[in-house]
Amino acid sequence: MKEALHLQYLVAAPADLRWGLAVNSVGYQEVGAGEAYPPGNHPSRYLFSEEQGRVLEEYQLLYITRGQGIFRSASLSHSVRVGQGSMFLLFPAEWHSYRPDRETGWKEYWIGFKGSQMDQWVSDGFFSPAAPVSQIGLRSEVVNLYNDAIQTASQQESLFQQRLGGIVAHLMSLARFYGRNAAFSEVVDLINRAKILISDQYRTLSPEDLARQLCMGYSNFRRIFREYTGFSPAKYIQEVKLNRAKEALTNSSLPVKQVAYEMGYDNEDYFFTVFRRMTGMTPMQYRAFTQGKKTPAE
């Protein structure tokens, strides 16, 4: 058995729970090739057999930095290969099991936590038992956060739980960020080209024209663009126009009609309608507000 460190049964005060994230355990362990898993020094609270699996009352986020193995859970129809650079999330009340391959062993970091903030993220669809694994690659930033959490939990200074909660939030954001960008690695160049074209041609560019310039069918392009950016191409173009209009209204004295024309709107009334729908203010109200002349309500 190689190196291991387990910090568990961390206490969370009522104020820590109101913070929205509280950590129960954090640590790491390294299992050599051919060694039993879980190892003999695995915390009894979290002990399980690979065949029978287990169910926890908390979330756990694990990160594998060496070796490879398999992960199974109740929401997955088949086992998933995990290994160096994999992050996987365990959900409360969700059966799961995982282990390293005997040929490789592995090194794992984990942090166990609970809280209303995480429950809300799951409810909002940011994390799901149906997609618990993220392939993020080896990231020193992530390892440093786990080590920071271990040190914070060891010292247990005043408000340590709230600092740990911040580390958990950072880790969860990186799981999404790196996982999403790795999944889209083959289309990143395409999306960046699309953004450049929009930035250059937003005044007159239609979503269909954009797809044609990228030599793609519109339906496929729209699906990929929306999955990556969170916007449809039409909505993204509209947001770019709006931001440029805001900049012009704030930093120039151009008449609103001229701003509308320069943003690609042939009809000033239509520009007025779109701007008010998206900002809650008319163009003139927005200009006055951002130039410090009066509030929107005045």
Image (spheres, helix red, strand yellow):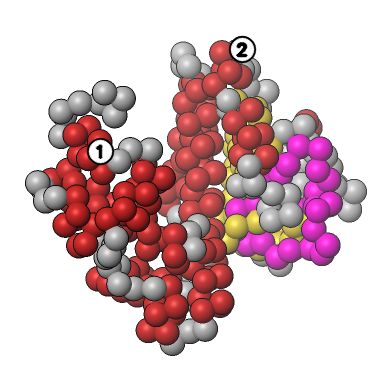
Amino acid type assigned to the residue bearing label 1 in the image: Tyr
**Residue 75 lies in the magenta stretch:** yes
Span of residues in magenta: 73-99
The circle drawn on residue 14 is 2
**Label 2: element kind:** helix
Amino acid type assigned to the residue bearing label 2 in the image: Pro
Does 221 appear above or below 284?
below
- Tell me if 203 is positioned left or right of 208 in this view: left
Residue under label 1, please give it: 286
Q: Position of residue 65 (x, y in %)?
A: 55, 56
Residue 126 in sight = yes
Q: Position of residue 171 (x, y in %)?
A: 51, 43
Does 90 appear above or below 132?
above
Mark 1–mark 2 Cα distance, whole angstroms, equals 43 Å
At 50% from the left edge and 57% from the top edge, which residue is drawn? 230
Q: Nearer the viewer, residue 205 or 123?
A: 205
At 65% from the left edge and 51% from the top edge, which residue is drawn? 88
The circle drawn on residue 247 is none
